[in-house]
Amino acid sequence: MIERRNVFDGVAIGEDMLSMEHITKIYDNGFVANKDVNFSVRKGEIHGLVGENGAGKTTLMKVLFGQEIPEEGRILIAGQPSKVQSPLDALAYGIGMVHQHFMLVNSLTVAENMVLGDEPVKGMLFDRAKARQMTAEVAKQYELDVDPDALVSDLSVGYKQRVEILKMLLRGAKLLLLDEPTAVLTPQETKELFVQLKKLREKGFSIVFISHKLGEIKEICDRITVLRLGRYEGTVDVKDVSEADISRMMVGRDVFLNIKKEKAQPKETVLQVRGLNFYNKLGIHTLKDVSFDLRKGEILGVAGVEGNGQSELSDMLAGLLTIQSGEVSICGESIRSKKIREIREMGVSLVHEDRMTYGVSRTQSIKENIVSDRYYKKNYNSHGVLGLKKILSDTQALIKEYLIKCDSPESEVRTLSGGNMQKVVAAREFSAAPKLLLASHPTRGIDVGAAEMIRKKIVALRDEGTATLLFSADLTELLSVSDSIFVMCEGRIVAYFPDASAVDEQVLGEYMLGLKTMSKEEMGGVLHG
Amino acid sequence: MGNAVKKSKDMTKTIERRFSFLRTLFAVLIALAIAFVLIATVSEKPLQDFITLLVGPLKNTSRMATIVSKAIPLLFTGTAVCLVYSCGQINIAAEGAFFGGAVAATCVAILPGIPPVIHIPLCAIAGGLAGAAVMGIPGILRVRYNVVTIVAALMINYVALYLGLYIILNPLRDPSAGFEASFLFSESALLPGLFGNQRIHLGLLVGLAAVVLGYWLLNHTAFGLQMRTVGENEKFATYSGMPVGKTIVFTSLISGFVAGVGGTMETLGNYQRFVYSGFTNHGWDGVMLAVLCHNDPKYIPVAVLFLAYIKTSADALNFSSKIPPEIISVIQAVIIIFVAAERFLAGWEHRSIVKHSKDAMSKGGAE
């Protein structure tokens, strides 16, 4: 059982309920994640914790939640210096955290997940009726509607998040730490979440909202604290600053939020996909009769809630998954039963969505990560012996061109930040002079500066004639980078917009959620013939 | 500021390297302390025996030659396991490959009438191919049928052992030997000694060559890059378009070849006929060596020398005292456990990295 201390009850609305002073956290690899950071939360506020990826937001919250022990600094809870050594301590104080990746057991019901780790018992047995009753009560109390008997595996992402929040409330949390809660939500789900958060604020709860999406911060937060490169940049009232001010604090310079590009000049068809179907290992039909064309010099965006067939589509086009039925041809040549290397040699590059597993080999050098797709070619090896000098000089040139921050080309990729890792991936995939670029979430989880550079490069490649298929969960990015867009829902293409500038997030969201579907005739343009 | 951060990162690497050395040093010291306690409890003259343990192998040239002689087979098996482990395959069939290599070499070595310049290479090739077959099978099974490598390798070791013993004890058995052994090797197949010492034989040079070639293969060839990439991240290798299956199979074959040649050299360098009646443990030692060397053949010679030294110490103790050789095995095991324990001294390491990062930050902040 979690012992509850109810320390926040004595704090009045609008007063500091908690503050962190001079927090310094240094990881084992020498990385200074937080340096002398100050942070405070008032009772009854939504406090934005903002900064680029790698700025130390998550680390600071892990310190507050007892998952990381800081090297220096102290935490004052209701004015008393306190030690938070573990998540159990944090929960006892009334601090709850909802992680970016949900901590729910898929095979259990909502009620079972709600009480997990703190189960009600009758004698020696689990008291299921009590668990259901507790869940129903807390759901009613906070007006967050959930079905106690639903299996978690059947729930949508937004629903799961609601369960996570309720779980923390059930455990007596008065302060909720939400780590990038909107990263996985559709615009509609985000809106719903915001309504719920505002209700909680009215009831006197406090919320720390981690994000790097400026629009959301403006909309929901009362105050924000900005971190940059692990340092404290300041705390401001949101009503006093503009989005541009916030981004300047985050990045330390002016950022152009919209990329500039000329109108696309699409030419002949490069990628032709016809009637593609895929059944995964469990026999689930994840791609249903997918057909589309992609032309030279065009960026075709793919919108969709994650898990609606996008991963299967990009893996299949790159040869990582075998084509079961349907036809894929690149410049008129089928890729069926071709090896990955052969497909790459046809001019296909892939920025894989799973950067840590497929995008890079973390324990190898930048050099070896850069040449992994081309080391066997004539200019890098003769009779099986590597031309190490040529590899080194080419890597150095790419490090310079892509502004990869590193000690040397020999540094292991694991020592780089997320943004710089992605630059390594981009350097390799973009420098292969692709005819077809498959870019799957190319800027996910990386800092604004690196994302800006990668987007610019994608547009530059388009202007040189590359055909690009861009998958992204970030609709702002998708709308600003793509020339045309199609939407996937449940493995199908459900909408096609020949001109990306003529749609907005709202419209895309409706198709992404399956609320609307275009007829075959309306989507006719997705096949250029 | 950028500069300061960069320096601190370099410093982190230096600290990591320093602690890697310290860890080994402390591991050896702790193991020796435990050894001393063990010796003190079983020995009548503990101090003298402890000194024998420490410097016994250096007492005379004969013992020093023993160190080298014990080191030769380990150069092969250590390199073989480094290669296959670098490719991420927990293929522990080096033991069987070493044994199988010795058997195959025996088949060729008993043939009469072949001049030495041809006979020795022929034996080595036969031994190498047998070794390649033994280690290659788990590799092929893994690639074709997704069999767990460690299980296949463990089983294939016994296949090699008993098939080998069957061949030696039936078609190749010399009934006139008076004990279970093969026919005598032809003179032309016996390895010449080096430095006028019969126990330090040609195998030393071949073994050192294997180490150098192994290192070169891993770090300077396209195939080596494939091996390491498959070993570090197989999915990344696949995504990059590397021929993953081929790489695993060829690596297993190459490793097996090296181990098989090792078995050949050990047999033809030290014996007149095939005399083993069971596993020789050289393959298992190879696994241990690869772990100690983090799969990098560069460190194999030093690690091999260390292991051979301890083994010679054991012999010396066994010879001059009543301490059972099992004690030495305990000491060896303790050393490996401490060196392999990555978190050993981790707290200390973390504190010193923190200190340097802080210094770098405060310098950076002042700029």
Image: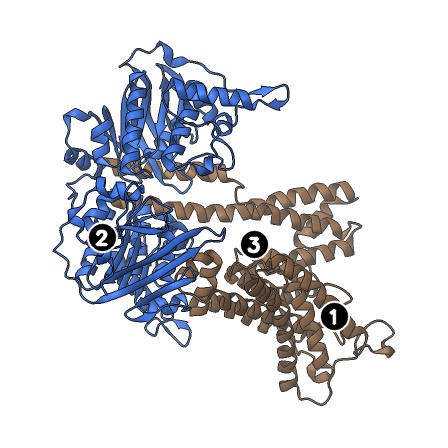
Please give the residue where the numbered disc 2 appears in the rendered image.
Answer: A522
Tell if the residue under mark 3 belongs to the same chain as the one under mark 1: yes
Extreme bottom residue here? B113
- Residue B327 relative to residue A93: left or right: right
At horizontal 29% and vertical 71% (from top left) the residue drawn is A332
Is A503 situated above or below B290? Answer: above
Question: Residue B123, image x and y in percent?
Answer: 66, 79
Q: Quadrant of residue B36?
A: top right
Q: Colour of chain A?
A: blue
Q: Quadrant of residue A249?
A: top left
Question: Residue A244, image x and y in percent?
Answer: 15, 36
Of circles 2 and 3, the one toward us is: 2
Q: CA distance from mark 2 to mark 1?
A: 71 Å
Tell if the residue under mark 2 belongs to the same chain as the one under mark 1: no
Is A84 situated above or below A456? Answer: above
Of circles 3 and 1, the one toward us is: 1
Tell me the element at label 1: helix
Circle 1 residues within 10 Å: few <14, some 14–19, many ≥20: some
Tell if the residue under mark 2 belongs to the same chain as the one under mark 3: no
Extreme left residue here? A262
The type of residue carrying mark 2 is Glu
Q: CA distance from mark 3 to mark 1?
A: 31 Å
Give me the chain that's brown. B
Q: Which mark is residue B163?
A: 1
- Residue A261 relative to residue B104: left or right: left
Please give the residue where the numbered disc 3 appears in the rendered image.
Answer: B292
Question: Residue B298, image x and y in percent?
Answer: 50, 62
Tell me the element at label 3: helix
Of residues B95 and B1, the one drawn nearer to the viewer in this rendering: B95
Question: Residue A208, image x and y in percent?
Answer: 31, 26
The residue marked by circle 2 belongs to what chain? A
